[in-house]
């Protein structure tokens, strides 16, 4: 069959008409209008935009040509402080959110209790870290502890919500067994629910730790320590670009290393020792969990590695 | 297990209970590791942050002028032009950053998966690029761009743009990994090029997720804009920062509550829309 003949034949077939998708056009139109309206009114000087590529290249040059290796020890120390804030903050958030997660699970408590708890969790999610950080400054001062507390409190909302979703996904067999054996509500939770959910919840904590490493940079806004403060001072105040370049590189490298380790541990916790076998980790389910899993950073990941 | 339980029950109380299996080594070492890391980071030494509950309790007893300000809220502040301009700018920054970030994130998300990348080289490059972008916090992008091009909304937009790209690319690529392979095979079998395959077989599958992640990122951007003003990157954070530095805690509290209400409302709307999308 020649090409021409094939073409003639295919044209003879009546193709079904493509349905007109109103929704898509409305959404696209709105987005274009929104974009034009915001870019048209936002207070930005044209000179800033035109200077952007040149200045970025210029300062990146100052940062890394040549790199200032003598800054590595100080930057590493600051980064370890950031990791400390993030870890302690995550542990505080974990401890505070753990009981709330049970109260927010529809399969364990009555509707009014769940509703009230969820509103509390929503509150902690809607308030940005910087607000908690400033409110806590008079308590523990400009110290890493304050940052850890702020990170911990603002982790309550997300951790509580995601943990509650894990609890809602449990197998009810063991719960029935516990009640058949005469267990009260607390005993059912202790012996039937917690053993089922603890691996996934611990994995959520680790995931939150990864997010909190990034969020700990908020300390830089007020000068409460860590790599965020170091970078804000070096770039914003001292303009010590070479030192800042080193600090930035140290931050990125350590963040990526910790991410990798934490990610491995999470996968090991969820999937068990047989790493070749992908037990039920149906990534196709990922979007459902993630969308609801509102988060201050990339959510989704826990769901993607977590069979629900 | 239930049959074992039943047999012990019927055999009377003197029968032997099945012995509890020892906990798996991973759980033991994992718990130990958790505790050691926590203690090391909490202690007051060179590499710890010096966490002490006693000092927190002591601090709680101290006067808190900032929370004090929340008692004498200055609602009139919310009507001042500076504050209104701050809110408007926050919305502008978040909108521009989300739209641009969403556009840039789409190819990055597709190529971050072995299904969507044209070849392995692109896959590895894009994956590393995405991790790199994600490893830098928005505040650091902001302070860099403020130093490079001056204060204002533009460095804020750029910081939120990178944040949006990181979040949307990460979340979307997770769905790309899990899509149904059927349409991809049929597209390939009918002779589609890689781009045609992405357009007809992959995009329709990830579109609802992608859209809802973009909406979710808009919320993140709103919240994120609260801190960027502290380094001079515009938005409502600029107002927070000014009031905080001048010690106007009554006004600060009012603006924080106003901001909270705005974020909460946007959050509810966005969650409702996202539920509808999927």
Image: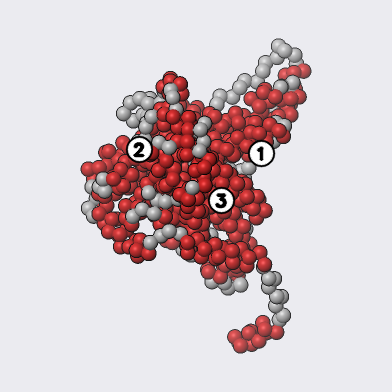
Sequence-wise first label, 2 or 1 = 1
Of labels 2 and 3, the one closer to you: 2
Q: Could you tell me if residue A207 is visible in this image?
A: no
- Report the residue marked by disc 1: A169
- Report the residue marked by disc 2: A223
Residue B142 picture location, percent across and down: 38, 50
Q: Chain of mark 1?
A: A
Q: Is residue B78 left or right of residue B144?
A: right
Could you tell me if the residues under marks 2 and 3 are in contact, i.e. CB atoms within 8 Å?
Answer: no
Q: CA distance from mark 2 to mark 3?
A: 29 Å
SS for callout 1: loop
Residue A184 picture location, percent across and down: 71, 22
SS for callout 3: helix
- Report the residue marked by disc 3: B216
Residue B114 picture location, percent across and down: 50, 58
Q: Chain of mark 2?
A: A
Q: Residue furthest top?
A: B14
Which residue shows up at 34% across the image and 63% down it? A47
Q: Quadrant of the C terminus of chain A?
A: top right
């Amino acid at each position: 069959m020649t090409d021409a003949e094939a073409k003639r034949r295919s044209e003879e077939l009546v193709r079904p008409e493509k349905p007109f998708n109103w929704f898509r056009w409305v959404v696209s139109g709105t987005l274009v209008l929104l974009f034009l309206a915001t870019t048209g009114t936002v207070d930005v000087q044209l000179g800033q935009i035109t200077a952007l590529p040149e200045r970025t290249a210029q300062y990146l040059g100052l940062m890394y040509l040549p790199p200032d290796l003598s800054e590595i020890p100080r930057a590493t120390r600051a980064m370890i402080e950031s990791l400390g804030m993030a870890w302690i903050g995550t542990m505080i958030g974990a401890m505070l959110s753990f009981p709330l997660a049970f109260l927010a699970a529809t399969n364990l408590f009555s509707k009014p209790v769940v509703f009230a708890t969820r509103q509390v969790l929503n509150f902690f999610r809607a308030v940005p870290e910087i607000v908690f950080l400033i409110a806590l400054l008079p308590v523990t001062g400009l110290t890493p502890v304050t940052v850890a507390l702020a990170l911990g409190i603002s982790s309550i909302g997300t951790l509580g919500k995601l943990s509650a979703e894990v609890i809602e996904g449990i197998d009810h067999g063991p719960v029935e067994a516990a009640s058949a054996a005469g267990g009260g509500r607390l005993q059912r939770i202790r012996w039937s629910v917690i053993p089922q959910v603890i691996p996934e919840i611990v994995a959520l904590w680790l995931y939150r730790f990864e997010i909190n490493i990034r969020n700990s940079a908020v300390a830089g806004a007020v000068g409460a320590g860590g790599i965020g403060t170091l970078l804000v001072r070096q770039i914003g105040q001292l303009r010590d670009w070479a030192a800042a370049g080193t600090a930035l590189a140290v931050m990125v490298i350590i963040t990526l290393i910790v991410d990798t380790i934490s990610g491995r541990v999470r996968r090991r916790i969820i999937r068990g020792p047989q790493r070749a076998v992908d037990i039920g980790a149906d990534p196709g389910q990922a979007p459902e969990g993630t969308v609801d899993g509102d988060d201050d950073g990339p959510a989704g990941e826990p769901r993607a590695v977590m069979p629900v | 297990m239930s049959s074992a339980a039943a047999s012990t029950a019927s055999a009377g109380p003197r029968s032997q209970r099945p012995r509890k299996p020892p906990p798996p080594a991973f759980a033991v070492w994992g718990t130990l590791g958790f505790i050691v890391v926590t203690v090391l980071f909490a202690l007051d030494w060179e590499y710890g942050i010096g966490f002490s509950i006693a000092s927190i309790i002591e601090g709680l007893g101290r006067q808190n002028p900032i929370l004090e300000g929340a008692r004498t809220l200055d609602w009139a502040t919310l009507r001042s032009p500076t504050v209104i301009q701050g809110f408007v700018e926050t919305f502008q920054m978040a909108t521009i950053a989300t739209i641009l970030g969403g556009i840039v994130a789409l190819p990055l998300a597709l190529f971050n998966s072995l299904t969507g990348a044209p070849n392995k080289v692109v896959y590895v490059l894009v994956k590393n690029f995405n991790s790199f972008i994600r490893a830098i916090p928005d505040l650091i992008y902001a302070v860099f761009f403020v130093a490079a091009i001056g204060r204002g909304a533009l460095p804020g937009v750029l910081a939120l743009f990178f944040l949006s790209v990181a979040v949307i690319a990460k979340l979307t690529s997770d769905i790309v990994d899990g899509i149904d392979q059927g349409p991809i095979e049929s597209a390939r079998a009918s002779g589609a090029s890689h781009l045609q395959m992405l357009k007809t077989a992959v995009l329709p599958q990830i579109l609802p997720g992608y859209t809802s992640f973009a909406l979710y990122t808009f919320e993140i951007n709103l919240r994120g804009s609260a801190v960027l003003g502290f380094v001079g990157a515009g938005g409502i954070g600029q107002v927070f920062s000014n009031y905080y530095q001048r010690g106007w805690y009554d006004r600060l509290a009012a603006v924080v509550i106003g901001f909270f209400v705005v974020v909460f409302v946007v959050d509810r709307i966005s969650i409702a829309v996202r539920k509808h999308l999927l």
